[in-house]
Amino acid sequence: MIIKKAEFVISNTQPAKCPRDGRAEYAFTGRSNVGKSSLINMLTGRKGLAMTSSTPGKTQLINHFLINDEWYLVDLPGYGYARHGKEGRRKIQEIIDFYLDEREELTCLFVLLDCRHEPQKIDLEFINRLGESDIPFALIFTKTDKLSKSRLNENIQLYKNKLLETWEELPPVFYTSSEHKKGREELLDYIENINKSL
């Protein structure tokens, strides 16, 4: 897929205010500071489309971007950022949960995981919640350029083994580096193939 056009449409905290034109939506979320905005900018080829920040927890809204006038890329808030405080984390989790439960247009949720870390309880709980709610999703390991190949394979195998303790089979898995544009074609082809099947 070639992205010729990517435009910001709306930011809000309520699924009721999301676009109602029936286009497919591909949403991205993950723990705060997982590299979500950088990945979105890399995928779309638009450097400042999603606001990147060295401060975790910058995205606190549901952001819709219209891609090629055909489908929406949705930037969801990151979950679990400690400095938001308990109440702040609860509000953000509510926004994410409300979107996941109410949004019929959601075609696939991409859950981002930082490949440098061991499986995190918060990620595993979130992934299991998707399974229980029957939400279609895929996993994206980010920042793969930050590790040696052997360490990367080791960490990813660790994650897969942990998931297979509760899952019979794994969802689709992608490996990305925003810096080196790694995984871009694979992700866009995956989205394009789903769009063709709708």
Image (cartoon, helix red, strand yellow):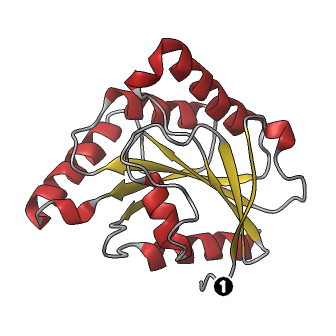
Classify 10 Å Cα crowding around label 1: few (below 14), some (14-19), many (20 and above): few
Residue 79 to residue 52: above or below: above
Residue 108: image location, x then y, percent: 62, 54
Residue 29 to residue 173: above or below: above
**Residue furthest toward the right?**
21
Q: Residue at x 55, y 13 (%)?
A: 87
Q: Residue at x 61, y 22 (%)?
A: 91
Residue 28: image location, x then y, percent: 55, 51
For disc 1, the marked residue is 4
Query: Which is nearer the eye, 81 or 22?
Result: 81
Q: Residue at x 50, y 71 (%)?
A: 47
The answer to whether one can see residue 164 in this image is no
Residue 187: image location, x then y, percent: 50, 70
Q: Residue at x 50, y 67 (%)?
A: 41
The answer to whether one can see residue 117 in this image is yes
- Image quadrant in which you'd find residue 65: bottom right
- Image quadrant in which you'd find residue 61: top right
Instruction: Classify residue 116 as left or right of residue 103.
Output: left
